[in-house]
Amino acid sequence: MEKCHRLWEYSEFSSEIEENISKGMCREEAIHTAIDTCIERGILKDILMKQKAEVQHMLLTEYDEKKHFRTIFREGREKGRAEGREEGREEGREEHLREQIRKKLDKGKNVPEIAEELEEDVSVIRRLMDDRVSGIPDHLKDDGFGL
């Protein structure tokens, strides 16, 4: 900004708007006041005097970066929560299936029987038979097909 005076002026103008908003002014009032203040201080005076209405209109109707980022953040947060809920449901479903598998193994049922009773594929039952159900005798793991 030291090398580009216009950039410094624009930065000052933007800061003036933000400061006015932080003082409790609505966006429109903050912009109008910042324009007047910057003209008085000689900041972007040539542009603001000639095109005051256009600048004000542009700032009120065009891109609002902070609002844009707040919206992106909110949408991302909502998406993350939804994904988290879905993952939680899936983990809960799998934990319930694991518990059912454990109970059926305790009754001496084998993998194909368990899969049929739980209406799941044998591959799903095998995947869920993780280290929490380790120590199961091999004859109970038998799928009846020598797999």
Image: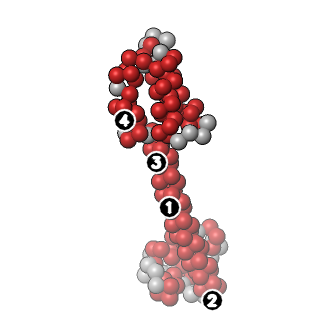
**Element at label 2:** loop
> Mark 4 sits on what residue?
58
Query: What separation in Å lies between label 3 and label 2 (alpha carbons)?
Result: 52 Å
| Cα–Cα gap, marks 4 and 3 | 22 Å
Q: Earlier in the sequence, mark 1 or mark 2?
A: 1
Residue type at mark 1: give it: Glu
Mark 1 vs mark 3, foreground winner is 3
Q: Nearer the viewer, mark 4 or mark 1?
A: 4
Q: State whether residue 29 appears in this view.
A: yes
Spatial CA distance of label 4 from label 1 is 38 Å
| Dot 4 and dot 1 residues touching (CB under 8 Å) | no
Label 4 to label 2: alpha-carbon separation: 74 Å
Q: For mark 2, what is the residue?
A: 107
Q: Which mark is residue 72?
A: 3
Q: SS class of the residue under badge 1?
A: helix
Q: Nearer the viewer, mark 1 or mark 2?
A: 1
What residue is shown at x 46% (from left), y 84% (from top)?
A: 119
- Residue at 53%, 28% (x, y): give it: 16
Please state the horizontal and vertical placement of residue 75, each as a whole percent of the image. 47, 54
Identify residue type, mark 4: Met
Q: Along the line of sight, which residue is nearer the eye, 29 or 130?
A: 29
Q: Nearer the viewer, residue 45 or 100?
A: 45
Q: Earlier in the sequence, mark 4 or mark 1?
A: 4
